[in-house]
């Protein structure tokens, strides 16, 4: 019963910042997803393929895969968009984006295709922190020549970091309103009104709530399991270390569960951590 109460509170407290809520909202309301990308990039998108929440891409059989919060492709072009709700600041954020770009490109370019087949790619991180400490709402990165910054490489890749902590007048009113909503829940402007209504509908959806609660209950089960074992926590860590090795080898989660005794949701959490670290 205690686990249900805790999980229910986590669901009640979850906002757009929560990866689960953000991903589900973009998945269930693709028009909202398209509009969000449009206002961030200041472009028009004709039509997007249905958003993929937590799309997993494996680089190669022995390589490190990635799991994307929301991955979208434009039907009329080869443009792709990865949108991440990144709530934790870390010193490896730039290298994470670099790796994401490489794995996405490998996934898009099939054997025998020419490099020219690669379309434009946009990776967007939405952050409730200012990773670069310059007070900007937006940091956009494209490849340029060190000797002549006017010379662009034009490889078609763009990395964008949005910060809710920005202080400059450097984004449109719609982007600013969106970032204010992420930061404090303030609803202002037509787009954010629509987004807030979509989030409210997602939070009222019993199927979505059930999925969230199931996930959280398993996490709580693992947390309590480790706590109850006390001095045997080392065994839990050992089981998790084994699980990580098996995850990297591509073993099915069900088999890892049988081999280690870890809950399936904990194994999924370890996989997510492995993909993002």
Image (cartoon, rainbow, N blue to C red):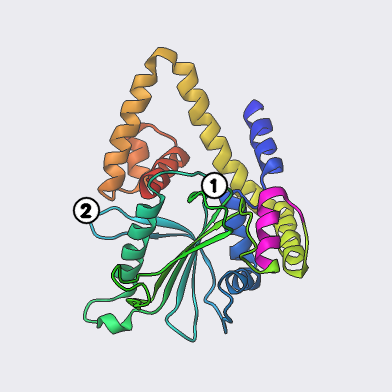
Residue at left offset 65%, top offset 38%: 10
Q: Nearer the viewer, residue 72 or 244?
A: 72
**Residue 57 visible, this orientation:** no
Which stretch appears magenta? 174-186
Taking the magenta stretch, the answer to whether it contains residue 232 is no
Lower sequence index among marks 2 and 1: 2
Locate residue 252 relative to residue 186 in the image: left or right. left
**Residue 26 visible, this orientation:** yes
Q: Nearer the viewer, residue 122 or 58?
A: 122
Residue at left offset 28%, top offset 42%: 246
The reply to whether callout 2 and callout 1 are in contact (CB within 8 Å) is: no
The residue that disc 2 covers is: 62
Seen from this angle, which residue lies furthest front? 147
Q: Is residue 237 above or below residue 31?
A: above
Residue at left offset 57%, top offset 70%: 37
Residue at left offset 51%, top offset 48%: 133
Q: Nearer the viewer, residue 177 or 261?
A: 177
Real-space CA distance between mark 2 and mark 1, rounded to the nearest whole angstrom = 29 Å
Q: Nearer the viewer, residue 170 or 188?
A: 170
Q: Could you tell me which secondary element the residue under label 2 belongs to?
A: loop
* Percent coordinates x, y for residue 115 in the rendering: 26, 80
Mark 2, other Cα within 10 Å: few <14 / some 14–19 / many ≥20: few
The residue that disc 1 covers is: 87
* Percent coordinates x, y for residue 187 in the rendering: 77, 58
Locate residue 62 relative to residue 149 in the image: left or right. left
What's the mark number on residue 194?
none
**Of the two numbered discs 2 and 1 in the rendering, the one whose residue sits closer to the viewer:** 1
Locate residue 151 relative to residue 188 in the image: left or right. left
Tell me the quarter of the image containing the C terminus. Answer: top left
Seen from this angle, which residue lies furthest bottom? 76
Mark 1, other Cα within 10 Å: few <14 / some 14–19 / many ≥20: some
């Amino acid at each position: 019963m205690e686990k249900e109460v805790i999980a229910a509170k986590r669901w009640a407290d979850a906002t757009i910042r929560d990866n689960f809520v953000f991903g589900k909202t973009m998945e269930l309301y693709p028009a909202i997803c398209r509009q969000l990308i449009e206002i961030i990039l200041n472009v028009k998108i004709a039509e997007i393929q249905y958003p993929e929440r937590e799309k997993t891409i494996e680089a190669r059989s022995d390589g490190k895969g990635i799991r994307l919060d929301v991955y979208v492709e434009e039907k009329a072009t080869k443009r792709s968009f990865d949108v991440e709700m990144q709530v934790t600041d870390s010193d490896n954020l730039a290298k994470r984006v670099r790796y994401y770009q490489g794995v996405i490109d490998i996934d898009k370019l099939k054997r025998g295709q020419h490099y020219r087949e690669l379309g434009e790619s946009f990776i967007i991180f939405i952050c409730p922190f200012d990773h670069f400490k310059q007070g900007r709402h937006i940091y956009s990165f494209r490849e340029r020549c060190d000797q002549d910054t006017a010379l662009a490489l034009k490889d078609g890749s763009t990395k964008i970091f949005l910060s809710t902590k920005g202080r400059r007048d450097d984004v449109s009113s719609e982007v600013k309103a969106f970032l204010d909503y992420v930061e404090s829940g303030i609803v202002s402007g037509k787009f954010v009104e629509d987004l807030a209504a979509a989030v409210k509908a997602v939070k009222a959806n019993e199927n979505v709530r059930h999925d969230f609660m199931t996930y959280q209950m398993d996490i709580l089960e693992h947390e309590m399991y480790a706590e109850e074992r006390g001095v045997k926590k080392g065994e839990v860590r050992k089981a998790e270390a084994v699980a990580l090795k098996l995850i990297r080898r591509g073993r099915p989660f069900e088999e890892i569960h049988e081999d280690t005794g870890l809950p399936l949701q904990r194994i999924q959490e370890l996989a997510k951590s492995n993909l993002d670290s």
